[in-house]
Image: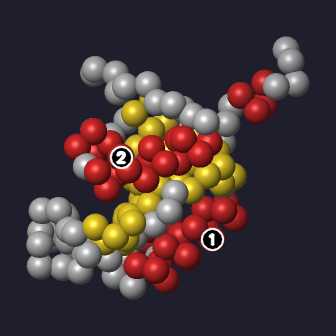
């Protein structure tokens, strides 16, 4: 077995980030946490977008991050929800309502796992910027 066996257990995760409650402050905090607790490979510029769905709320700050982690997909998803909680996320009755931080896995090991990548420019734009800057490409989502 080669010495690369340990490194091969790492996963690359493309994350979509969104916030519209004190968004600049929460973005800086989220980035600091993920840089400290994961290996940050690349991040996009921040964009500002109008809300989708529920309209009676402030505009969003959106970005994308590419990180490397040794967590499994399920464990990393749970970890991101815990990071949201650490940043004061309250999960209210309106799913698309205001939030301090929303961290969603868009792609896992180069494969799209979230349809939002195809549906929303605020996900695809920053994600494509991260892919281009890091020399990565994505495989389409597999049909279940």
Label 1 neighbourhood size at 10 Å, few (<14), some (14-19), many (20+)?
few
Report the residue marked by disc 2.
124
Find numbered disc 2 in the image and state the secondary structure of the residue it sits on: helix
Q: Quadrant of the N terminus?
A: top right
Q: Nearer the viewer, residue 138 or 89?
A: 138
Residue 46 in view: yes
Residue 80 in view: no
Residue 11: x %, y % from top left: 61, 37
Q: Nearer the viewer, residue 127 or 22?
A: 127
Q: Give the total number of marks visible in the rendering.
A: 2
Residue 80: x %, y % from top left: 48, 58
Residue 43: x %, y % from top left: 56, 56
Q: Are marks 1 and 2 in contact (CB under 8 Å)?
A: no
Find numbered disc 1 in the image and state the secondary structure of the residue it sits on: helix
- Side (left or right) of 109 relative to 50: right
Q: Residue at x 78, y 31 (%)?
A: 6
Q: Residue at x 46, y 30 (%)?
A: 138
Report the residue marked by disc 1.
32
Res 140 quadrant in image:
top left
Residue sticking out furthest to the top? 1
How far apart in space, not on screen, are marks 1 and 2 (Cα)?
23 Å
């Amino acid at each position: 077995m080669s010495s690369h066996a340990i490194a091969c257990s790492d996963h690359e995760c493309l994350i979509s980030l969104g916030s519209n409650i004190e968004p600049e402050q929460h973005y800086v905090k989220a980035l600091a946490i993920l840089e400290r607790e994961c290996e940050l490979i690349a991040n996009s510029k921040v964009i500002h977008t109008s809300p989708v769905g529920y309209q009676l709320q402030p505009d969003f700050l959106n970005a994308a991050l590419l990180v490397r982690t040794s967590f499994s997909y399920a464990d990393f998803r749970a970890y991101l929800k815990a990071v949201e909680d650490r940043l004061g996320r309250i999960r209210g009755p309106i799913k698309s309502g205001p939030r301090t931080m929303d961290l969603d896995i868009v792609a896992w090991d180069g494969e799209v796992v979230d349809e939002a990548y195809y549906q929303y420019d605020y996900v695809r734009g920053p994600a494509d910027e991260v892919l281009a800057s890091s020399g990565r490409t994505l495989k389409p989502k597999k049909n279940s």
